[in-house]
């Protein structure tokens, strides 16, 4: 294997900034659906259901996006391992942006009947398909350009993108929610954030048009003919471990940002504005601390950071739901913040950790499949499971705390079985035995 070439800091800064902007835009598309599902999609697209069943149905369409993400990682991972990381960034952004704009154009159930929720399902699936390719392309392009001793730091830039995307999506929703009446918001206001995705996608495509291909990809002499087949044959254990390890991060994030939003507004009677403000404030801190977690990962290792984050999650899930149940802004914010600090300890280094675990010829497929399977385990099911568990509990949803603690324990065990990779250069890590 040739030595992986690195680039100077100014070039790395431009590359990292473009990757961050792209992931922010794509995750904006993904998150705006989750917020709409929590606030308004149930009554508009499932009006014959009870309020609880409507919320569950809306979250089910939300979960379809997660189911599609591993399929997107297979599709775009094949392109990334065969044709390069750069084409993945353009194709995935186009697909996600177009499907998001289309969601904002779907008529409601009152207009076209059952076709309305079916169209939502299809478009949410396409959103997930595009996002499944986005993470692997953006992270790998940054990680494979970065110097080994600062790989976690540079790779953390695209990891800040989800926080920015979430803040942008919820910021737009917050402004609309605060400035429109409930009737106006339900009639047309909720569509505006989806239409905005078109302009954001155009900006993202412009930013990514000048990115150079990954040096690690250019130095591969023998490209995998069918990357997925090699991953399944040689790295199946690694894929399962990474999926299980990452499940807790997804569970935490979507419990805080999606389920708690619906729970707070519907069960506790907290206003949309207060809930969105508390959640967004915690996400701001989470995004700001991501590079710090990455620096610690470069200094002390990826695995220790992940183990510490998982252990913190085990200890903090019951306090999180107890503080949420108060319905008061400051305790809710502190509960969300503690959960997201545990999250950032893990996901601040994941963008460096996962690529280092896989050999370059199947890295785009392997890392993306493991990452997105973790999304299915932790992200797709959490809003649905938490909503159902909270319905059968008292004011404090202890069942949700137990559910999240169980996922954290599972992830802790998986991280304990994964190897450390720092400071071995990306191209030199031996593949884990299948």
Image: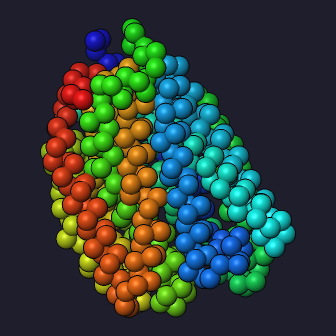
Q: Which quadrant is the N terminus positioned in?
A: top left
Q: Is residue 199 left or right of residue 425?
A: right
Q: Is residue 57 above or below residue 345?
A: below
Where is residue 260 shown, x and y percent of the image? 45, 76
Q: How is the image coloured?
A: rainbow
Residue displayed at 42% across by 69% down:
385
Between residue 337 and residue 136, name the one nearer to us: 136
Q: Residue at x 55, y 53 (%)?
A: 65
Question: Which of these two is toward me, 197 or 5?
Answer: 197
Number of numbered discs on residues: 0
Query: On the rendered structure, is 213 left or right of 310?
Result: right
| Residue 15, placed above or below residue 246 | above
Left or right: residue 184 compared with residue 197: right
The residue lying at 29 percent from left, 61 percent from top is 407
- Residue 237 location, quadrant: top left
Q: Which image quarter is the C terminus in? A: top left
Residue 216 percent coordinates (x, y)? 38, 20
- Position of residue 33 measured from the top left corner of the image (x, y, whole percent): 60, 62
Residue extending furthest right? Answer: 111
Find residue 25 and report its horizontal and vertical position in percent: 58, 50
Question: What is the quadrant of residue 143 in the picture?
Answer: top left
Residue 213 in view in this figure = no
User: Which residue is depicted at the point 59% across and 38% down?
Assistant: 92
Depth check, front residue: 320 or 152 = 320
- For the question of whether residue 340 can be seen, the reply is yes
């Amino acid at each position: 294997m040739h030595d992986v070439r690195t680039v100077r800091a100014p070039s790395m800064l431009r590359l990292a900034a473009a990757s961050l902007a792209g992931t922010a835009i794509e995750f904006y598309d993904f998150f705006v659906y989750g917020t709409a599902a929590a606030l308004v999609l149930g009554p508009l697209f499932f009006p014959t259901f009870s309020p609880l069943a409507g919320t569950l149905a809306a979250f089910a369409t939300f979960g379809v996006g997660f189911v599609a993400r591993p399929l997107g990682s297979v599709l775009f991972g094949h392109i990334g391992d065969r044709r390069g990381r750069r084409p993945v960034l353009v194709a995935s952004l186009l697909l996600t942006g177009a499907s998001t704009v289309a969601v904002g154009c779907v008529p409601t159930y009152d207009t076209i009947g059952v076709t309305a929720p079916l169209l939502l399902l299809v478009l949410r699936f396409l959103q997930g398909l595009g996002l499944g390719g986005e993470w692997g392309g953006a992270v790998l392009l940054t990680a494979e350009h970065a110097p080994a001793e600062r790989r976690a730091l540079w790779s953390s830039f695209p990891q800040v993108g989800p926080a920015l995307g979430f803040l942008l999506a919820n910021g737009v929703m917050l402004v609309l929610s605060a400035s429109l009446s409930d009737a106006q918001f339900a009639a047309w206001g909720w569509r505006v954030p989806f239409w905005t995705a078109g302009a954001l996608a155009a900006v993202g495509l412009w930013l990514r048009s000048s990115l150079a291909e990954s040096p690690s990809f250019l130095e591969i002499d023998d490209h995998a003919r069918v990357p997925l087949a090699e991953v399944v044959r040689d790295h199946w254990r690694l894929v399962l471990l990474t999926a299980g390890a990452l499940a807790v991060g997804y569970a935490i994030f979507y419990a805080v940002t999606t389920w708690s939003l619906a729970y707070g507004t519907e069960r506790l009677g907290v206003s949309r504005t207060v809930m969105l403000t508390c959640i967004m404030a915690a996400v701001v801190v989470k995004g700001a601390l991501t590079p710090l977690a990455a620096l610690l990962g470069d200094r002390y290792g990826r695995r220790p950071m992940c183990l510490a984050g998982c252990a913190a999650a085990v200890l903090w899930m019951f306090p999180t739901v107890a503080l949420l149940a108060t319905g008061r802004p400051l305790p809710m914010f502190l509960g969300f913040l503690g959960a997201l600090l545990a999250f950032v300890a893990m996901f601040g280094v994941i963008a460096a950790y996962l690529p280092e675990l896989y050999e370059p010829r199947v890295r785009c497929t392997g890392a993306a499949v493991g990452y997105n399977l973790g999304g299915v385990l932790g992200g797709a099911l959490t809003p649905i499971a938490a909503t159902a568990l909270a319905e059968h509990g008292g004011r404090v949803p202890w069942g949700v705390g137990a559910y999240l603690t169980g996922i954290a324990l599972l992830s802790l065990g998986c991280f304990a079985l994964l190897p450390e990779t720092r400071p071995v250069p990306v191209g030199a890590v031996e593949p884990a035995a299948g």
